[in-house]
Amino acid sequence: MSVSIKNIDSCRSTNALLADMTDAPHATVVATREQTAGRGQRGNCWEAEPGKNLTFSMLLRPAAMHASRQFELSMAVSLAVADAIDAALPEGISTQIKWPNDIYVGLEKICGILIENKLSGSYIERSIAGIGINVNQDVFVSDAPNPTSVILKNGGRTTDLATMLADVADRIWRGFADYEETGDTVALKERYMSRLMWTDGLHPFEDADGAFDARICDVEPDGTLVLSNGKRYAFKEVSYRF
């Protein structure tokens, strides 16, 4: 089995389009030149200049993965994407993961990931990873905080989108296959934590009670964030103050 990439000129959302392809096999990718209603985390829109970036979704069909393990899938995908972006960046510049799965260079966002799972009973029937990578866009006009791109980090040198898409998709496919084969959750978690932002020192966060400084101590198996203030947070219950 290998990755199958379907390129289309324009659509509202590659996640929605791929979800409608109910018979699509594992490792199917739908990529588009222009996404008119792409969604990011927290319901935000994703800014992407047509023809300049990678906007695509990848279908994964885990073998007997219980719903309680879905964050393992998120970790595997975010690590594969981070590795692919690192390969496109100049030597000495590398990415980190912002919990739960966005990709940053320093304090600048270079990639957003939105993973949507469909369950069959207590197991994941299929997972769709929607991925937006800022590649050749050098001007951003939305109010999204701190965007950056591969071209901005490469001194204005463009990157071939088809080549990078093939590399990202292949890394996701192979990384997920390797993880399913080994089932090594300890190694996966160690890799994820080593790439996670804000695990050292104190950093500005905000929750329903207000602003505070903390560091990330752990991420639990279900994706719950554990901070040094002694609290545990589900997604959207805490934010980083840029």
Image (cartoon, helix red, strand yellow):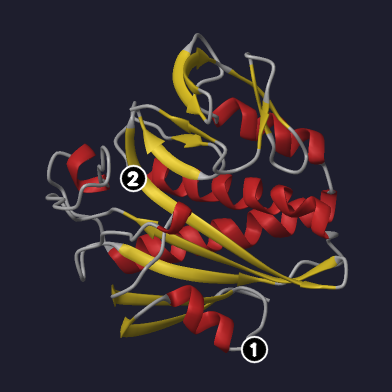
Amino acid type of disc 1?
A: Thr
Q: Is residue 235 above or below residue 77?
A: above
Position of residue 64 in the picture relative to residue 222 (left or right): right
Give the residue at x 34% y 41%. 109
Position of residue 81 in the picture relative to residue 118 (left or right): left
Mark 1 residue element: loop
Q: How many marks?
A: 2
Please give the residue where the numbered disc 1 appears in the rendered image: 22
Q: Residues within 10 Å of mark 2 (few under 14, many from 20)?
A: many
Q: Residue furthest front?
A: 209
Mark 2 residue element: strand
Please give the residue where the numbered disc 2 appears in the rendered image: 110
Give the residue at x 42% y 57%. 40
Amino acid type of disc 2?
A: Ile
Query: Residue 122: where, in percent of width, then height?
Result: 87, 66
Q: Residues within 10 Å of mark 1 (few under 14, many from 20)?
A: few
Quarter that holds the N terminus: bottom right
Give the residue at x 59% y 53%. 77
